[in-house]
Image (cartoon, helix red, strand yellow):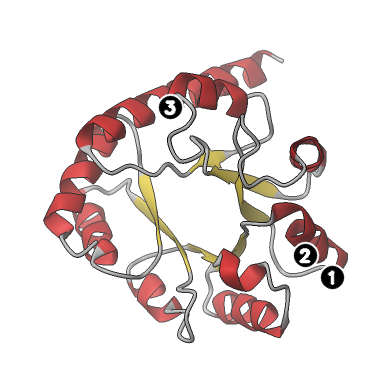
Amino acid sequence: MNNPNAMIEILEVSYANGARGIEVIPTGKILEAARMMIERYDDYRIIGSTYPGENPKIDALINSGANLIFVHGMISDNRGVNLIKIIDEISSSGVIPGIATHNPIPTIKFCMKNSLNVKIFLIPFNAKGFLMGNQEELEHIVDNVKDFHFIGMKTLATGIIKPEIAFEYIIKHNICALTIGMINNQQAAESTSIALKALMKKQKKSKIN
């Protein structure tokens, strides 16, 4: 987390295999690495999640070029005043606010019931149901709530699921994008290329239908 050059190497491999952005939490040197990628590639994008501490570091994300910022799950899953305050702070900065959640069903329902100013959720979504709560219920929400967008995280369930199986599951549902954890070049190349092929397959099917 404190070696931007090592992170750049992985991000470069990921980019070469089709990734065009990164989702970051502002800690360590990851923002430095992300800014270096933006300087190198015009089509590279940064999205972020707030820092879960007292200072959410929204300014650091905005100054790095993030145009979508999720409230961190440790804040959003408390579903309290702090959540609404941070959403308002992100929105007032001219950046799209979103919600990251580790407890997706009650948090999504809370946001919808209270008409919070968010239209996009970063949620755990994988074939094993890892961190999804009631898997069938979350699938139903994702596939039938049309006014919101859903980005999948924990798609490999911390490495339990093989990428081919993981992403074939993803494309059966209304997931518009993915964030994938990776710690070496091999993972970056494999996961990115397989995920991209799956998403392109989904897009092709959507056009046919």
Q: Badge 2 is on which residue?
A: 111
Q: Badge 1 is on which residue?
A: 114
Are there few (<14), some (14-19), or many (20+) residues within 10 Å of tag 3? Answer: some
Quarter of image, res 60: bottom left
Q: Badge 3 is on which residue?
A: 196
Q: First in sequence, mark 1 or 3: give its number.
A: 1
- Residue 43 at what x, y percent from top left? 32, 45
Q: Quadrant of the C terminus?
A: top right
Quarter of image, res 114: bottom right
With 181 as the anchor, is 124 left or right in this view?
Answer: right
With 100 as the anchor, is 30 left or right in this view?
Answer: left
Residue placed most toward the observer, 200 or 141: 141
Quarter of image, res 144: top right
Label ID, residue 124: none
- Residue 198 at what x, y percent from top left? 50, 22
Name the residue rendered at 27%, 29% in the picture.
189
- Kindly report the distance in space between the C-alpha atoms of the residues bearing marks 1 and 3: 35 Å
Q: Which amino acid type is shown beneath numbered disc 3?
A: Leu
With 12 as the anchor, is 197 left or right in this view?
Answer: right
- Residue 63 at what x, y percent from top left? 34, 74
What is the secondary structure assignment of the residue under circle 2? Answer: helix
Q: Which amino acid type is shown beneath numbered disc 1?
A: Asn
What is the secondary structure assignment of the residue under circle 1? Answer: loop
Q: Are marks 1 and 2 in contact (CB under 8 Å)?
A: yes
Q: Which amino acid type is shown beneath numbered disc 2?
A: Cys
Are there few (<14), some (14-19), or many (20+) residues within 10 Å of tag 2? Answer: some
- Kindly report the distance in space between the C-alpha atoms of the residues bearing marks 3 and 2: 30 Å
Name the residue rendered at 65%, 21% in the picture.
206
Q: Are marks 3 and 2 in contact (CB under 8 Å)?
A: no
Name the residue rendered at 40%, 65% in the picture.
25
Residue placed most toward the observer, 201 or 101: 101
